[in-house]
Amino acid sequence: MARTPVAVLRRTARPAGSPSEGPLPEPAGGTGWFRRPGRPGRSKRTRQLHGGPLVYLILGFATLLSVFPFYWSIVAATRSNAEINHVPPPFTPGGNLLGNFDKALDEADIVQALINSTIVSVTVAVGTVLCSTLAGFAFAKLRFRGRGILLGITVATMMIPPQLGLIPLFMIMAKLEWVNQLQAVILPTLVTAFGVFFMRQYLMEALPDELIEAGRVDGASYARIFWSIVIPIARPAMAVLGLLTFMTTWNDFFWPIIALSSSNPTVQVAINSLGGGYVHDQSIILAGTLLGTLPVLVVFGLLGRQIVGGIMQGAVKG
C-alpha cells in the first residue's frame, strides 16, 4: 500500500465544520491552516512601545542636571576668577583655558599626580578584580567548612565605617615606613568586600555547576578551571567591577591626603593644593579638576561600549 506524503495530507486536511467537498476555506491571515507554533499570522504586527512627550521631557531634564556641573567646570576653567564671580555669571566658555592650565601646573605637580593616580588606580583595579573573582568563585561554587560564616563576616565588614580603622592603618604604614609612598595607598584597597560579594552573586547565576563537574572529570585542577572556565564567563562582571574600582580609586581623597604629601601626590591631593591664598582662585582649581577628569572620561569612552555590550551578552546567555 502506497503511503500518502505528509505534505499532501496537510493540504487536503479539512478543519472541523468545513464542507466535505469543494475548495478548502482560507483563514483570514492567509497563511494556511497549519502554522508553526508560536508564530502569529501575517496580519499581526509587532507592537513597539514608545515613550510619550512627558517621558522625553523628564529624561531631557535629568540629562541636563547631570551634564551641567561638568559644563560649568569647563566654563569656569576658561574664565578668570573675577568673571566667575560676576553677577550674572557667564555661561559660555572663554579664552583663558591654557593660561589657567599653566597656573595649575605651576602651583601643583599635576603631571606627577596623574602618573601616580594612574599607577594606583590600575594596580588597585586589577588586584581587586582578580582577588574578588577568586574569592567570589570560592564562595559561589566550592564547598568547604565555614563558607557561610566567612561570607557573612566579609559582608559585615561593609557596615564598618572606614574612619574607625584610620589610626590603626596609619600606624601600620608608619611601622612599615610606607608613609608618603604609593604602596600605602595601594595595599589597603587591593581587595574589597563589595567586589567579593558582587562576583559571588554573578557567578552563582552565570556559572553552571555542570561546567565545573565536566572540568573535574577531564582531570583539570581548580586553577585550570578558574583560568579556562570561570574567567571567560565572568568577563562582563569583571569589566564592570574594574571600571567602578578604577573610578573610585581615582576619585579617592580621604586616605591619600593622610598617607601622601604634596611632594608625591595623587590627583585629588594635588587639586587640594591649588588656588591657595586669602581668596581661592576657582578658575585655577577647576582647571586642575578638568585635567584630573579627562583621563577618567577617556577610559570610560574607550571601555563603556564594551562593558555595556558584555553585560547585554551575559544577560542574553543567562
Image: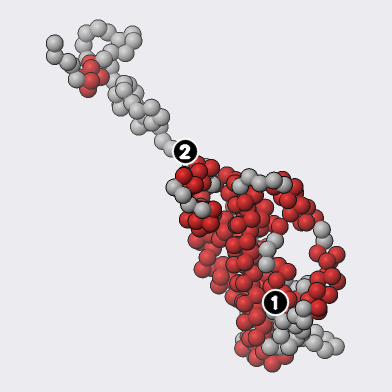
**Residue 71 visible within the image:** no
Q: Which mark is residue 10?
A: none
* Vertical order, 26 against 86 (above or below): above
Residue type, label 1: Gln
Marks 2 and 1: which is nearer the front?
1
Give the left or right position of residue 41, taking residue 144 as reference: left
Going by the numbered disc 2, the residue's amino acid type is Arg
**Left or right side of 235 for 87:** right
- Indicate the position of residue 41 as horizontal and vertical percent values: 36, 29
Q: Does residue 180 appear anywhere in the picture?
A: yes
Q: List the single residue furthest toward the top.
A: 20
Measure the C-alpha gap from mark 2 to mark 1: 57 Å
- Name the foreground residue: 138 vs 88: 138
- Local packing at callout 2 (Cα closer than 10 Å; few below 14, some 14-19, many 20+) is few
Would you name the residue on which mark 1 appears?
A: 183
Residue 234, located in which quarter of the rendered image?
bottom right
Q: Are marks 2 and 1 in contact (CB under 8 Å)?
A: no
- Numbered tag placed on residue 47 in the rendering: 2
Q: Is residue 150 above or below residue 297?
A: above
Which residue is painted at 31% across and 21% down in the image? 33
Q: From this viewpoint, which residue is outermost toward the front?
A: 219
Of callouts 2 and 1, which one flags the residue occurring earlier in the amino acid sequence? 2
Residue in the image at 85% along x and 64% along y: 164
Percent from the top left, x then y, of residue 194?
69, 57
- Front residue of this view, candidates 299 and 1: 1
| Residue 141, percent from left and from top | 59, 46
> Who is closer to the viewer here, 187 or 40?
187
User: Residue 146: x, y in percent?
Assistant: 72, 47
Q: Quadrant of the N terminus?
A: top left
